[in-house]
Amino acid sequence: MPETRFTVRWPDGRTEELYSPSTVIRDHLSAGTAYPLEEFTARCRTALEQASLRVEAKYGFRCTSADAQLAQIERTLRSFSPPADVVCLTIS
């Protein structure tokens, strides 16, 4: 499964490279697009859950890296209040 990295800019201006074990993230996020906090959370949750299930289907176990990345995203997002956007800068 080709892992995919995506870079985001948080509402406080920091940028961070994030991880998906699958290209499925491309079905849920687009580079250069700003997402409201709740929408970004939902899109990442759906994409990383699908990615983890793809790994499970292929290898017999969930991807703990995808689960950990989602938990980290959710922790980071709790420090911001709406209205605020997360910008997906790149997907590679």
Image (cartoon, grey):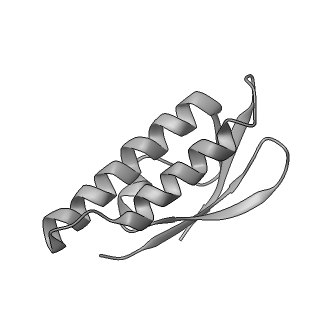
Q: Is residue 75 above or below residue 89?
A: above
Residue 90 appears left or right of 25: right
Q: Residue farthest to the top? A: 83
Numbered label tally: 0
Q: Residue at x 14, y 64 (%)?
A: 57
- List x then y, in percent, for residue 30: 53, 50
- List x then y, in percent, for residue 12: 85, 44
Which quarter of the picture shows residue 26?
bottom left
- List x then y, in percent, for residue 32: 65, 51
- List x then y, in percent, for residue 55: 25, 67
Q: Which residue is drawn at 75% across and 26% down?
A: 81
- In this view of the protein, which residue sits in the foreground, 34 or 79? 79
Is residue 25 something one can see in this rendering? yes
Q: Residue at x 59, y 55 (%)?
A: 31
Residue 65 appears left or right of 61: right
Q: In this view, does 5 lie above or below 75?
A: below
Is residue 30 something one can see in this rendering? no
Q: Residue farthest to the right? A: 13
Quadrant housing the N terminus: bottom left
- In this view of the protein, which residue sits in the foreground, 6 or 19? 19
Which quarter of the picture shows residue 17?
bottom right
